Amino acid sequence: MTKEDCKKVVLDIISEIAPDEDLSNVRGDVRLRDQLDLDSMDFLDIVMELRKKYGINVPEADYMKLSTLDGCAEYLTPKLNTVKA
């Protein structure tokens, strides 16, 4: 899975959690919460979906690594590549 694939995974999860959000212009280097109307509960929902769908546990200490789309790709790509499809 490439970093672009990983970004799509994250955007797909966000689209399920916040279906009214326009994700077409999300920038990779800007905090997701600064671009989208996401609160802390939405963020926790993203983390929970990663665990439920892909078996990826994100420790609370690593949450800041998921603050941007680029950060999500950097952090999650190696983890998603070890998940059995």
Image (tube, rainbow, N blue to C red):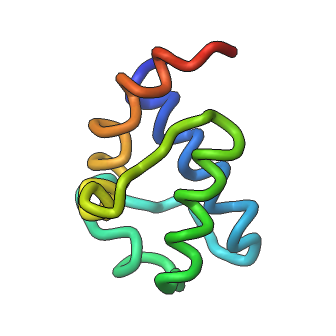
Number of numbered discs: 0
- The answer to which of 66 and 70 lies nearer the viewer is 66
Q: Quadrant of the C terminus?
A: top right
Q: Residue at x 39, y 28 (%)?
A: 77
Q: Where is residue 63 in the image (x, y as percent from the top left)?
A: 32, 61
Q: Residue at x 52, y 38 (%)?
A: 56
Left or right: 17 as drawn, with respect to 6: right
- Quadrant location of residue 45? bottom right
Q: Where is residue 82 in the image (x, y as percent from the top left)?
A: 47, 15
Left or right: 80 as drawn, with respect to 59: right
Answer above or below: position of 59 versus 34.
above
- The answer to which of 42 and 57 lies nearer the viewer is 57
Left or right: 82 as drawn, with respect to 29: right
Q: Where is residue 54 in the image (x, y as percent from the top left)?
A: 63, 34
Q: Which residue is drawn at 48% across and 34% down?
A: 6
Q: Residue at x 56, y 81 (%)?
A: 41
Q: Where is residue 47 in the image (x, y as percent from the top left)?
A: 53, 57
